[in-house]
Amino acid sequence: MSESDMRRARDAAPAAPRHVAIIMDGNGRWAAQRSLPRAEGHRRGVEALRRAVRNASDLGVEYLTVYSFSSENWTRPKDEVGALMMLLKRFIRNDLAELHANGVRVRVIGAREGLPSDIAPLLAEAEEITRNNTKLTLVVAFNYGGRQEIIAAARALAQDVAAGKLRAEEIDAALFESRLTTRGIPDPDLVIRTSGERRISNFLPWQSAYAEFVFTDVLWPDFDRAAFENALAEFATRERRFGGVNAINQKTAS
């Protein structure tokens, strides 16, 4: 590659991601490595979340989506689920005022039906109090499953077709996206998964179709400013083509 081509490649590097999504993984392993209960790992994970929110705002990220609790996590041991619910309630009660004061808007994605009676009102309260904030949007994926979200959207569209409100041929990607719980939120540019695992675990499968992925061995409780910056630096080396070709390949082919 010539020097001029290398320069063009560097110039084509993407700007800082507008939307970062994180699969916060490794709380249990972090605790096990220290002979601590899993609940302590989750507690330290909440501290890491606080850091991530502050760092995202400082680093110019506009949307931060975190996978806090999947629709499959209900199958975990009852005491662990109870501890996770307690941490969620504590996070909202203790941190909501600070989030609001710092201009953070909270959005919650995931199924709301069947949630515990002491959880659903807190989620709605967090959204309502912060709805007009504009500095950073914190998207909390709670009781979320990507396949379930897609099925729900397809079912809603099918019901409209059956009711004569919509013709099947009118359904396109934009209309489909309007039925997802992430409607109005831009697709993630970067998805980070901690703890060394290399899978998305039913997290934003539709929305992350063209996202860049960074997998780090850092366990979530240890995910700090340096780890965040390293992920953004790796993102900056990627060339996002969205199914097209880059300028250098296009020149070679012509």
Image (spheres, helix red, strand yellow):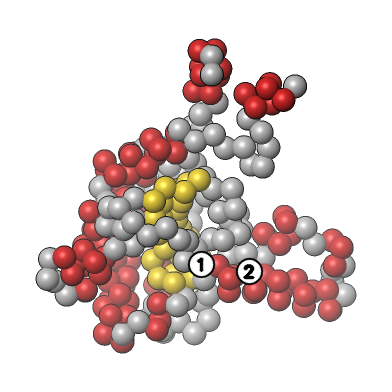
Residue drawn at x 53%, y 81% as measured from the top left: 113
For the N terminus, the image quarter is: top right
Q: Is residue 217 visible?
A: yes
Front disc: 1 or 2: 1
Label 2: state its secondary structure: helix
Q: Give amino acid for label 1.
A: Asn
Q: CA distance from mark 1 to mark 2?
A: 11 Å
Residue named by callout 2: 150
Q: Give amino acid for label 2.
A: Ile
Residue named by callout 1: 202
| Vertical order, 93 against 50 (above or below) | below
Q: Is residue 66 visible?
A: no
For the C terminus, the image quarter is: top right
Which one is earlier in the sequence, the residue at label 1 or at label 2?
Answer: 2
Tell me where residue 228 appears, x and y as whole percent: 33, 44
| Vertical order, 207 against 27 (above or below) | above
Tell me where residue 137 appears, x and y as whole percent: 45, 51
State the image quarter where residue 78 is shown: bottom left
Tell me where residue 249 appears, x and y as whole percent: 65, 27
